[in-house]
Image (spheres, rainbow, N blue to C red):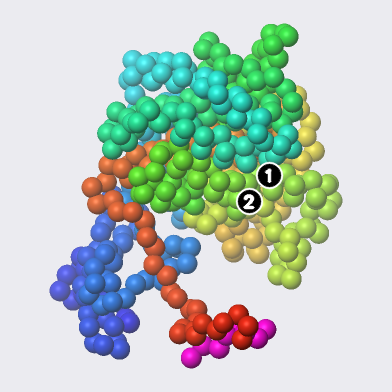
Amino acid sequence: MSPKKSKKSTDTVTITDNSTGKSIELPIRRGTEGPSVFDIGKLAQTLGLYTFDPGFRSTASCSSAITLIDGEGGRLTYRGYSIEELAENSTYLEVCYLLWYGDLPTKQQLQEFTRTITYHTMVHEGLRDFYKGFRRDAHPMAIMVGVVGALSAFYHDDIDFSEQHSRNIAAHRLISKMPTIAAWAYRYSQGEPFPYPRNDLTYAENFLHLMFSYPTEPYQVNPVAAKAMDLLFLLHADHGQNASASTIRLAGSSQANPFACVSASVGTLWGPAHGGANEAVISMLEAIGSVDRIDMFLERAKDKSDPFRLMGFGHRVYKAYDPRATLIRKVCNDVLRELEVDDPLFDIAQELEERALNDDYFKSRNLFPNVDFYSGIILRAIGIPTNMFTVIFTIGRTIGWISQWNEMMQDQGMRIGRPRQLYVGRQHCTYQPIDKRSNEETQSK
């Protein structure tokens, strides 16, 4: 089979099956920016062929107007706005409005949206009892998967999610309640009381209050910590068709309850190759231990026979410096200075970054620091335990997931997800009665 540009039009490609001589012209679809795609929707019915693309490295699973990632240029935009501009001038809740509704809000719109989120941060009292079913030593992400999924039972209300108004309600509930659910997962693991949200605090301030306050004394939120937390939420808000975003689209395509769909994305994010990477970065820096051991670990990373890899370096999409990493690195300096935290891991991270960026091995492979490299150090400085790092990611990414789900629900061409496969198993096996079977596998005809 040989793809080639059609001589008739620059807007199609011709695919020919050399074994049969059959051909098909497939239309090229061009976005407003980024690579074009050719539409293979009629490939199977015309040629009886499917594509094979493990990991979907060359496949666009949908069209989207939410997030653009320019991997070659190291650029990230939400709804057309650069991540640098948003980080400098915006807040997480303003970005939530942008991602959900498609435009930046007016002052009144943002006030109304903020009030809606703020006054829905409490969860159903029945959910408090739900936590008691978990072991105290359960990973907070395991608790998140269960409790977020349980929202389907507490907030279903027989809502028709084919209507935009109902989807708006679900989005507001998820954005507002996720910090409460997340903080309570931590408090439960510590055997500590569950504080209630406060309506006089900002989104990030409220999360820190839920994490660290006690009913026996007033808690004063550190403004530096709150600002850093808000930025982390903002930088993690969305990132295109990653594994967890693809998960919510696949789950949502079955018309499943959105809370169940988000729970599926939480489970996907938990993986160390996705949202769990910032935990792995801290573990790596602790293993290195000191600046004078960095060269040894860099050599180990180059050795293909050594399982050690540099965590927090490289990205599947970015071939340049991750723009989020640039912003987080600066904030990391600010947080450590303002909070007067002396973290030796930060010194190791800075020196590791400098040596890796000046090493031809890593430069030739585009292994630059990504968003996970410095975020864990910021969280440590604020007092967030390592097993809560991915939970923080979950809070920030919730708006991205539900925005992807909402966009899919509005797509008139949406169909239930059903990827094909290349079958490589046995054929035409003959069933043998159990008393006639040997230890050897049944031979196929």
- Element at badge 2? loop
Residue 219 visible (yes or no): yes
**Relative to 258, is 29 above or below?**
below
> Picture coordinates of residue 133 (x, y %)?
65, 34
Along the line of sight, the residue nearer the viewer: 328 or 169: 169
**Disc assigned to residue 279:** 1
Q: Quarter-wise, where is residue 115 in the image?
A: top left
**Relative to 217, is 281 above or below?**
below
**Relative to 179, is 438 above or below?**
below
The furthest residue to the bottom: 445
> Picture coordinates of residue 434 (x, y %)?
60, 80
Q: Residue at x 24, y 68 (%)?
A: 42
Q: Quarter-wise, where is residue 4 in the image?
A: bottom left
| Dot 2 alpha-carbon crowd within 10 angstroms: few under 14, some 14 to 19, many 20 or more | some
> Picture coordinates of residue 389 (x, y %)?
65, 38
> Picture coordinates of residue 230 (x, y %)?
55, 27
Q: Which residues are magenta?
A: 437-445
Along the line of sight, the residue nearer the viewer: 45 or 361: 45
User: Is 58 included in the stretch rendered in magenta?
Assistant: no
**Disc assigned to residue 154:** none
Q: Residue at x 46, y 19 (%)?
A: 120
The furthest residue to the top: 217
Q: Residue at x 52, y 19 (%)?
A: 122
Compute the Cα span from label 2 to label 1.
8 Å
- Element at badge 1? helix
